[in-house]
Image (cartoon, grey):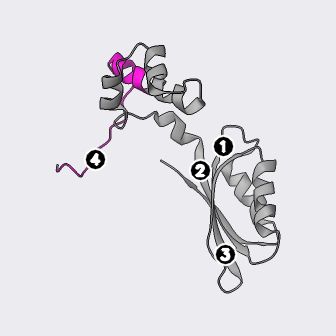
Amino acid sequence: MNKLERRFYLVDAQVLPEVFLKVVRAKELLASGEARSISAATRAVDLSRSAFYKYKDCIFDSENGREVITVMATLRDETGALQSLLAGISAAGASIVTINQSTPENGAALVAVTIRTDTMQMTPEELTEKLSRQHMVVGVHCGYNL
């Protein structure tokens, strides 16, 4: 394997050395704002900064990825189309992470909305069905982010 290739394994946290778990916890503290700096995060979990820097780009919590999906929709080029789509996603209880929209062509625009599903009151399939019934939605489907 050359240096540019990366290979990932899914490993039970129970068998990981404690240093990896501390790195993940420090990253969580930084992401949540509980720790304002790497120094504060590493102090809070009793981890050296050098260990944090050594492993921070090598270990990830796979559970976080399960909560995120991307809703891909084709919308009519009409005023309020994006707002209507976002309102439908929000009404389902999802939290919007990112929104990307293309420039409209031939009366339609492509939109990708990345959402967190952990607070949704319906399945992604039910959300897709609900959104597809909006009159300004030409087509919609969900993709899981791994």
Q: Is residue 133 left or right of residue 33?
A: right
List the residue tagged with mark 4: 6
Q: Earlier in the sequence, mark 3 or mark 4?
A: 4
Residue 109 on image: x %, y %: 67, 75
Mark with earlier residue (3, 1):
3
> Is 118 or 106 nearer to us in this picture?
106
How far, Cα to Cα, is label 4 from label 1? 28 Å
Of pointers 4 and 2, the one earlier in the residue sequence = 4
Three-letter code for the amino acid on which mark 3 is drawn: Ala
Chain part drawn in magenta: 2-23
Tell me: residue 48, above or below residue 83: above
User: First in sequence: mark 1 or mark 2?
Assistant: 2
Q: Amino acid at mark 2?
A: Ile
Name the residue beneath numbered marker 2.
69
> Badges 1 and 2: C-beta atoms under 8 Å apart?
yes
Q: Is residue 117 visible in this depiction of the protein?
A: yes
Label 1, secondary structure: give it: loop
Amino acid type at circle 4 is: Arg
Element at badge 2? strand
**Marks 4 and 1, the one that precedes in the sequence:** 4
- For image coordinates 80% across by 77% down, the residue present is 78
How would you rate the neighbour count of disc 2 (Cα within 10 Å): few for under 14, some for 14-19, many for 20 or more? many
User: Pointer 3: residues within 10 angstroms few (<14), some, or many (20+)?
Assistant: many
Report crowding for label 1: few under 14, some 14 to 19, many 20 or more residues within 10 A (C-alpha).
Answer: many
Q: Nearer the viewer, mark 4 or mark 2?
A: 4
Q: Nearer the viewer, residue 107 or 71?
A: 107
| Residue assigned mark 3 | 109
Tell how many labels: 4
Q: In what element is the residue under mark 3?
A: strand
**Residue type at the position of mark 1:** Thr
Cα separation between marks 3 and 1: 24 Å
